[in-house]
């Protein structure tokens, strides 16, 4: 019997799921606890379908913990490569098999504590093995589907798998624990998918609060389709008219600058503007040259007048000296006389 109103809601959900999925089973193909343990370790970050593709060859090569404990790591890696994280998984599988042989006679232990001490085995894997292989309700398996659905259904507000498991355990009787996860996982895959929950086709539609589920209309935005379309059309129209009007105004301005000239082709316009630019460059160069030339001339004139002045001064002083000293004496002239 439910213990409080929350239990009542959980009980309703559990009952509806039982009716919708009377027969459920684990999706990982296995024939004993050892194989289920191996398959569950491989299913981390991988789909059950992918794991089921890999395990037949793996179980054929290493059928028990004794064979797997003696396996070469590289052989195991090759067999499980496609499941992702294959090196870490191979290491854990061989190490777990060694522990099973050393501590448990090659058997998979039946208690949670011993299981969670094996390499690569956490609480979720231990719950899967104990619940599915041995029928022991050690807890509730919380994978991505269980997490998503139990939130949407209003069974938990917690975020971590451990806390979600405790919330569910508190609301459901232990006899429901094992199959409740299987049912949620099955329902999550069939109806209540992550991105497209089919609420209108869901057997739980009337009792599920659909926490965090956006209707298609909401998720597509609050505008109805027709108004979105007309807005898009109007945006497209205004963009078109804007670009049209800007083209027209550019053409007008070209027309104005050309006066009454007939319209020219782009090539002719380009040639004209280039010729005009050349003319401008020539005028500018000439205008610059003129003052330069006159400045140079002036400078040259100044220079030559300075030189002439100096020459004049030199001549003048020479003439004065000659006047004072008389004609210059030649030393050799005197000895020859
Ligand atoms: S009603 Fe919608 S949200 Fe609730 S379980 Fe069904 S599909 Fe998921």
Image (tube, rainbow, N blue to C red):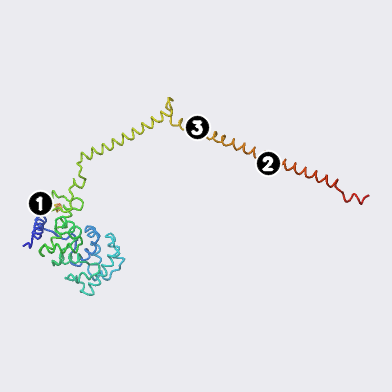
Q: Does the numbered disc 1 mark a residue whose Cβ is under 8 Å from ligand 1?
A: no
Residue 276 bears which disc, if any?
3
Image position of 55 with respect to 238: above or below: below
SS at badge 2:
helix
Q: Which residue is mark 2?
A: 303
Q: Which residue is mark 1?
A: 206
Q: Nearer the viewer, mark 2 or mark 1?
A: 2
Residue 295: percent from left, percent from top = 62, 38
> Outermost residue toward the front?
324
Q: Quadrant of the N terminus?
A: bottom left
Say which of 156 and 55 sits in front. Answer: 156
> Quarter of the image holding residue 36?
bottom left
SS at badge 3:
helix
> Quarter of the image holding residue 166?
bottom left
Q: CA distance from mark 3 to mark 1?
A: 82 Å
SS at badge 1:
loop
Q: CA distance from mark 2 to mark 3?
A: 41 Å
Residue 135: percent from left, percent from top = 13, 66
Mark 3 surroundings within 10 Å by alpha-carbon count, few (fewer than 14), some (14 through 19), many (20 or more): few
What residue appears at the point 56 percent right and 34 percent down from the top-left corner? 287
Say if mark 2 contacts mark 1, CB within 8 Å: no
Say if mark 3 contacts mark 1, CB within 8 Å: no
Residue 152: percent from left, percent from top = 16, 55
Image position of 20 with respect to 253: above or below: below
Q: In this rendering, would 126 be left or right of 295?
A: left
């Amino acid at each position: 019997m439910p213990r409080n109103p929350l239990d009542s809601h959980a009980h309703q959900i559990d009952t509806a799921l039982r009716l919708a999925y009377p027969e459920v089973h684990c999706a990982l193909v296995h024939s004993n606890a050892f194989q289920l343990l191996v398959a569950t370790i491989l299913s981390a970050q991988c789909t059950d379908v992918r794991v089921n593709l890999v395990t037949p060859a793996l179980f054929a090569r290493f059928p028990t913990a004794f064979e797997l404990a003696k396996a070469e790591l590289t052989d195991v890696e090759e067999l499980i490569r496609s499941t992702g994280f294959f090196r870490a998984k191979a290491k854990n599988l061989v190490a777990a098999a060694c522990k099973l042989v050393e501590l448990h006679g090659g058997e998979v232990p039946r208690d949670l504590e011993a299981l969670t001490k094996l390499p690569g085995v956490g609480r979720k894997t231990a719950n899967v093995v104990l619940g599915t292989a041995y029928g022991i309700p050690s807890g509730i398996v919380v994978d991505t589907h269980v997490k998503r659905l139990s939130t949407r259904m209003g069974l938990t507000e917690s975020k971590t798998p451990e806390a979600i498991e405790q919330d569910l355990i508190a609301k459901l009787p232990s006899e429901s624990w094992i199959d409740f996860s299987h049912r949620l996982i099955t329902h999550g895959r069939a109806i209540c998918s992550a991105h497209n929950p089919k609420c209108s086709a869901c057997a739980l539609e009337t009792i599920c609060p659909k926490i965090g589920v956006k209707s298609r209309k909401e998720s597509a935005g609050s505008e109805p389709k027709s108004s979105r379309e007309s807005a898009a059309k109007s945006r497209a129209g205004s963009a078109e008219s804007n670009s049209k009007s800007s083209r027209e105004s550019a053409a007008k301005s070209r027309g104005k600058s050309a006066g009454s000239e007939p319209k020219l082709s782009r090539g002719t316009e380009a040639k004209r503007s280039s010729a005009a630019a050349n003319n401008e460059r020539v005028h500018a160069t000439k205008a610059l040259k003129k003052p330069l030339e006159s400045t140079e001339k002036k400078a040259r004139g100044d220079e030559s007048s300075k030189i002439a002045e100096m020459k004049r001064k030199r001549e003048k002083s020479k003439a004065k000296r000659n006047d004072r000293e008389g004609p210059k004496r030649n030393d050799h002239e005197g000895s020859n006389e």
